[in-house]
Amino acid sequence: MPNYRNINVRSPFFTQKATTGSVVNCEIRLWKGDVVTDLPVDYTYLLSKEPTSGKSTFEVAELARDFLSHTTSLSSGFAWMELKLKDTIVADDTFTFLVSEGYSINTEGLQSTNDTPLYDFVGLPTATINGFANSSRIMVAQGSSNTIPYLSNSNGVDYTIDAYDASNVSLGLATIPLETNSSQMVKSYLITPSISSAYFDFDGNGRNVVVDVLRCSKFDVVNLLYVNKAGFKTKFPFILKSTEKISVDSESFSRSTVDYGALTLNTNSHSSRKRIKDTKQSFVLNSDWIAEYYVSQFEELMLSEYVWLEKGSLTLPVNITTSKLDKKTHLNDKLINYSIEIETASNYINTIR
């Protein structure tokens, strides 16, 4: 598995050192670039804590999260973090992590340097698909594309990806090279409608990803690019009817239109005036009829804090305004599809000065 554990800093991450001393210092270094050659000499943050019951405990995720930033680039939103725990009694404890804006849920417990991490080198939910455990699915619309996000090779083991066409013929084995730069630690494998599946083999640990090609639709394809639970970017396609609205927030004020010099009333001037404060462009999108597996992906989309709308050549940062998710099943609901409401993350009228 990767030498550098990926930690999800939307959820807390704890580190702890046992000591017989009076205080433990935690040096936190955050940086982008190469994991070795770009390691800063000076720490980014220094935390100090007196021990409780012989242990000093630090929560570091929020500080790491402040260091991250996202664009539509699939490689953005990652950085290195080194934790160095020091007292004056025993040797330092040093940990190095790749950090991303993923999260864990309550039933998965706490993240810490004391737990046993579950390495997930493909950033998609897992399920048993076609009788194969630890598999995933991804949708791609006709005339469009999607990407499978995956962790790069960070320790030089055998790491390959093999994609197959609709006739289950290999499209060529790709070997994943060693990477040490934070911008290259998470990559994306391009999926088009000509691909039926992709198999990731990380040193004997396999993950099969089934590709579901969505049917042709008379409506334009809209993809929502989002940061998912693993902190990686992928897309959720919407191919059915979509609608668009413009909303306006305004205030009114009154003024006199009397010309006091001529003592006449100017009937061509506005005595009541409206000032527009905010304008928002919003959309309602509808998915295709989907497999139950995709309910997990839709949940991750709903819980994402970074979302972009892609429609043709247009890309817009958006926020999801839908606030409730009904977790549908084939047993209860028979057929499954979802609607989602979003609005642009900036004013429709450009007011940035």
Image (spheres, rainbow, N blue to C red):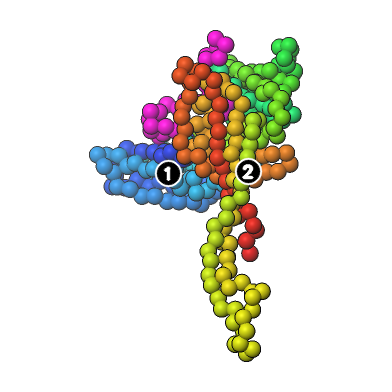
List x then y, in percent, for residue 158.
Answer: 63, 20
User: Who is closer to the viewer here, 78 or 222?
Assistant: 222
Mark 1 belongs to which amino acid? Val
Q: CA distance from mark 2 to mark 1?
A: 41 Å
The quarter of the picture where the N terminus appears is: top right
Q: Is residue 13 left or right of residue 98?
A: left
Q: On the image, which quarter does residue 267 sit in?
A: bottom right
Mark 2 belongs to which amino acid? Glu
Residue at the spot 66% in from the left edge and 18% down from the top edge? 197
Where does label 2 land, which residue? Answer: 244
Residue at the spot 55% in from the left edge and 44% down from the top edge? 319
| Number of other residues with Cα within 10 Å of mark 1, as a class: few under 14, some 14 to 19, many 20 or more | many
User: Who is closer to the viewer here, 41 or 44?
Assistant: 44
| 100 within the magenta span | no
What span is colored magenta in the figure? Answer: 104-133
Where does label 1 land, which residue? Answer: 60
